[in-house]
Amino acid sequence: MSTIQVEVVSAEESIFSGEAKFVALPGEAGELGIYPRHTPLITRIRPGSVRIEKADGTEEFVFVAGGILEVQPNCVTVLSDTAIRGKDLDDEKAAAAKAAAEEAVRNAKNELDLAKAQSELAVMAAQIAALRKYRDKR
């Protein structure tokens, strides 16, 4: 079976680089599944899990807090401000950040503050969902 080169990059570092049989991630309009020789595509992605089925059959999970996806027939590139390897996700930190975001929603003084807090809350909820998905797969 053919493979596709996958690059997942955060603002700080390369999170994953390697060959894969399949990649699934949360596109702006719904879940995307990408196989080798996929039609070229550029789209925004929502916060959630990137699931990479590697060439050896194992899976890699990465949480992204949104970003941009570029697909070329032989390469998939995911660019995100924040990307965390599934094995590095922390239950306690995610729960504390979600609680802080919920508090910020309750204490928002204007529409801009409310929108920022709601966005952060959505990212943290997606991170917790990704963490659960990762833990269930192990």
Image (tube, rainbow, N blue to C red):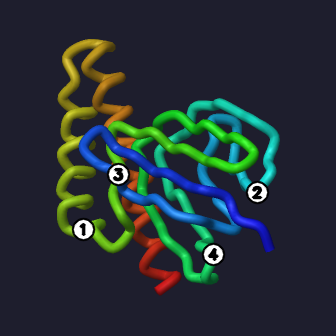
Q: Amino acid at mark 1?
A: Asp
Dot 3 or dot 2: first in sequence order is 3
Question: Which mark, by number, is residue 14?
Answer: 3
Residue 41, compared with residue 36, is above or below; it is above
Q: CA distance from mark 2 to mark 4?
A: 11 Å
Counting residues from the start of the chain, the first of labels 1 and 3 encountered is: 3
Query: Which of the two labelled residues, at mark 1 and mark 2, occupies the earlier sequence position?
Result: 2
Numbered disc 1: secondary structure: loop
Q: What is the x, y in percent for residue 104? A: 20, 34
- Residue at mark 4: 55
Report, in whole angstroms, how far the alpha carbon at label 1 lies from the one at label 3: 19 Å
In the rendered image of this protein, does residue 41 appear above or below residue 116? below
Using residue 78 as the reference point, say whether residue 127 is left or right of it.
left
Residue at x-position 73% and y-position 55%: 33
- In the picture provided, is 84 more to the left or to the right than 66? left
- Residue drawn 22% across and 24% down? 108
Query: Residue 48, how many percent across, how many down?
Result: 49, 52
Tell me the residue at 62%/71% (across/down).
53
CB under 8 Å between discs 3 and 2: no
The alpha-carbon separation of the residues under discs 1 and 2 comes to 32 Å
* Residue bearing mark 1: 90
Q: Helix, strand or loop at disc 4?
A: loop
Name of the residue lying farthest toward the bottom: 138
